[in-house]
Image: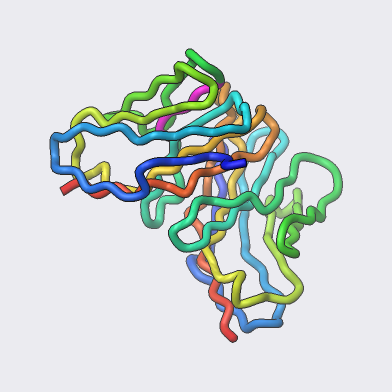
Amino acid sequence: NAGVTQTPKFQVLKTGQSMTLQCAQDMNHEYMSWYRQDPGMGLRLIHYSVGAGITDQGEVPNGYNVSRSTTEDFPLRLLSAAPSQTSVYFCASKLGEYTEAFFGQGTRLTVV
Amino acid sequence: AQSVAQPEDQVNVAEGNPLTVKCTYSVSGNPYLFWYVQYPNRGLQFLLKYITGDNLVKGSYGFEAEFNKSQTSFHLKKPSALVSDSALYFCAVRDLNTGFQKLVFGTGTRLLVSP
């Protein structure tokens, strides 16, 4: 049972480049989300999904897009990378409203 | 808005001693509280949660947390610390104001257990 799998683990981008962070879970969870972790700020929600075909914005959505075509996958797209998007990104999934979230191992992104 | 505060950036404790990592919360309505641990270069791992019921919640790896409604606190505790407990600990509360009921995280407390 792999849980939540994120790829890549590390990435360096130049300003203006685009890329997609991949997230897949094999637990048949309906709820999936993307957080970014910055020093001294905890984790902040970027986008989330409550099921296939349903996505919504979190508290820091600007510069990111998401889609949810299947239950398993929830990719995060950076449209035009900026140095302010240098961060560690975590994907998480959970079974339902009252359950705990399971996190992937993270993607460390550096934008130069 | 729901929020949690972790007043200590770092907690130092000697191996074998009891440890406490503090968390206070601010919510409207009933709080749903969580503790997560993050080891270096790893994702967050769930430790325990309080939804309702007993104020003392037991979790993974010998950790427990005490919910105190009058003090709006949810401190993480362990009777005897291990060097391997050294990690970053996050307290979180569920935000009931969003349909997703996102987790609102504290800024984290680094626990350092010395041999």
Residue A44 visible: no
Residue displayed at 65% across by 76% down: B82
Residue drawn at point x = 48 percent, y = 40 percent: A5
Asked whether B79 or A6 is in front, the reply is A6
Instruction: Estimate the x, y position of residue A87 in percent, counting from the top left.
Output: 32, 48
Q: Position of residue A57 (x, y in %)?
A: 42, 24
**Is A46 situated left or right of B31 in this image?**
left
Which is nearer the eye, A87 or A76? A76
Q: Is residue A60 left or right of residue B26?
A: left
Magenta portion: prevailing SS class: strand
Q: Residue B61, located in which quarter of the rendered image?
A: bottom right
What residue range appears in magenta? A46-50
Determine the image quadrant of residue B65: bottom right
Inspect this view and state whether residue B9 appears: yes
Q: Residue at 40%, 48% (x, y): give it.
A: A37
Residue with the most extreme front position: A1
Residue displayed at 75% across by 55% down: B59
Is the residue A42 above or below the residue A4 in the image?
below
Residue B64 is situated, as x and y percent measured from the top left of the image, at 75, 60
Given residues A48 and A19, the one toward you in this image is A19
